[in-house]
Each structure stands twice: as C-alpha cells, then as structure tokens.
Image (cartoon, rainbow, N blue to C red):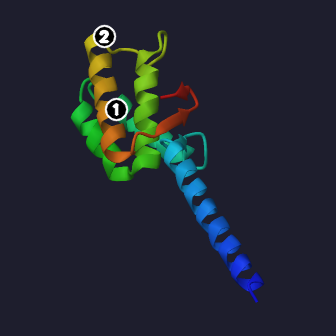
Amino acid sequence: MRLPHVFLFAFVFAFVFVLTTCGQASKQAGPAIVNCAGANRAEIEKLLTTWSTMPADDWATITGQAVAVGVTIGGCAFAELVLRRKLPGDIMARSTAPELNEGRAAFEDFRSRHAAGATFRTIRGDL
C-alpha cells in the first residue's frame, strides 16, 4: 500500500517544481511592450494633432493629458511625439536640443511612474 504515497509525493514534487519554474520565468520577463500600431490609432492621432498646436516645451500639460487618457493611448502618443520631434525633416521637428532633452526626460518620467517601464512600439520605432 505504499504505492499511493509514492504517487502523491511525485505529484506534489512536480507541482512545486512547475510553480517555482513559472515564477522564475515571469520575474525574468521584464517590462511589457505596448503595441501602438493597433486599434487605438485614431485616438493616438487625435492626441498628436492636439499636441502639435501646443508650445514645443509644454511637457507638463502633455504629461497630464497622457496620464488622463491612459497608458495605451497617452503613452503611445507621448512616445510618438518625442520620436517625431527628434527626427530631422519632420513637420513637428521644430524643437531645439534642450526641448528634446526635456521631452525625453518627461517621457521617461511618465514611463517609469505610469507604465511600469514599458517599451512603446510605435510606427516610428521603439521607445
């Protein structure tokens, strides 16, 4: 009658092994990736249009609006705005170097406080 105890021990051992292995894998996964080319494109573009009429250095307002609409839409629009303003020849590339640095710093602050360090995969690249 020792056989059922062996099966029980083997089952418990396997169960604990799976739980520990899965827990380690999830800890190593790192920050999420937010896909900005998906279904929210219209909302992202609308926010970018609004921001294009604002002063290039009004990062506090941009951050507040990004937080208000959420990480997926606001974070994607924020990442795209920073990328647009840094690319030469772009319509929105009117920012000077200090404004770009302030914008990137504001975005990084948004990312760490509201997006858990996520990477935003935009149509212009990852940020």
The image position of residue 103, as x and y in percent, is 31, 25
Q: Nearer the viewer, residue 85 or 28?
A: 28
In the rendered image, is residue 32 in sight? no
- 75 sits left or right of 65 in the view: right
Q: Is residue 74 visible?
A: yes
Q: CA distance from mark 2 to mark 1?
A: 15 Å
Label 1: element kind:
helix
Residue 95 image point, x, y percent: 33, 15
Dot 2 alpha-carbon crowd within 10 angstroms: few under 14, some 14 to 19, many 20 or more: few
| Residue ID at (49%, 10%) | 89
Q: Say left or right for 30 vs 95.
A: right
Name the image quarter holding residue 54: top left
Q: Amino acid at mark 2?
A: Ala
Q: Residue at x 29, y 26 (%)?
A: 105
Q: Quadrant of the N terminus?
A: bottom right
Q: Residue furthest front?
A: 2
Mark 2 near mark 1, Cβ–Cβ under 8 Å?
A: no
Percent position (x, y) of residue 24? 54, 50
- Identify the residue under disc 1: 107
Give the mark nearest the N terminus, 2 or 1.
Answer: 2
What amino acid is found at the position of numbered circle 1 in the picture?
A: Phe
Position of residue 14 relative to residue 67, above or below, is below
Residue farthest along the bottom direction in this orientation = 1
Horizontal side of residue 113 vs 4, given as left or right: left
- At label 1, counting other C-alpha atoms closer than 10 Å, the crowd grade (few under 14, some 14-19, many 20 or more) is many
Labelled disc at residue 97:
2
